[in-house]
Structure formats: C-alpha cells, structure tokens
Amino acid sequence: MGTVKRRDLLKELKKQGIVVDEHGGRHAKLINPLNNHTAPLPRHVEISEYTAKDIKQQLGLT
C-alpha cells in the first residue's frame, strides 16, 4: 500500500462533513457530527493508506 497526503485526506473528509479539531499534541481530532464518532489524525505530511482507511472506518464513513 502507498501513502496519501494529509491535506488531501483532510479535504476529502471535510467534503463528507467531518469536523477537525486541531488542538492537541501529536494528533488532530476528527469528529463526525452525524454519529458523534471520533478518530485521531496524525500530524505527518503523508499517511499510509491503511491508516486512512482505518480513520474512515472509525468515523463510520465506510
């Protein structure tokens, strides 16, 4: 598997209604306001596709 750019993943998630809380340390907090599910988002420039898929599952998007 490859990687995805963090900014591209954020853009995709925001289009689906995900809210981003950038406060905190090593991770930002992603919130799905429709079901109140949350997921951490690492502050790396590139994120593995496996991690991106896991984040979407945690948010209830898949």
Image (cartoon, rainbow, N blue to C red):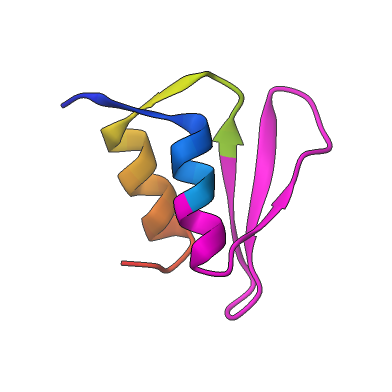
Q: Quadrant of the N terminus?
A: top left
Q: From the top left corner, tell me how far across and down residue 11 is, in percent.
A: 52, 49
Where is 21 relative to 35, above or below? above
Residue 57 drawn above or below residue 60: above
Q: Is residue 17 magenta?
A: yes
What residue span does the magenta drawing correspond to?
12-40
Report whether 53 appears left or right of 1.
right
Residue at 39% in and 67% down: 61
Towards the viewer: 9 or 33? 9
Q: Is residue 19 left or right of residue 34?
A: right
Residue 44 position (above or below residue 21):
above
48 left or right of 24 in image: left
Classify residue 36 by image quadrant.
bottom right
Would you say 2 lies left or right of 16 here?
left
Of the pair 35 and 3, the residue shown nearer to us: 3
Report the residue that reaches farthest toward the left. 1
Instruction: Name which residue lies at 59% across and 63% down.
Output: 18
Which x, y percent locates residue 51? 36, 36
Residue 57 on the magenta span: no
Residue found 53% across the figure and 35% down from its top: 7
Q: Quadrant of the C terminus?
A: bottom left
Residue 8 percent location from the top left of the image: 45, 39
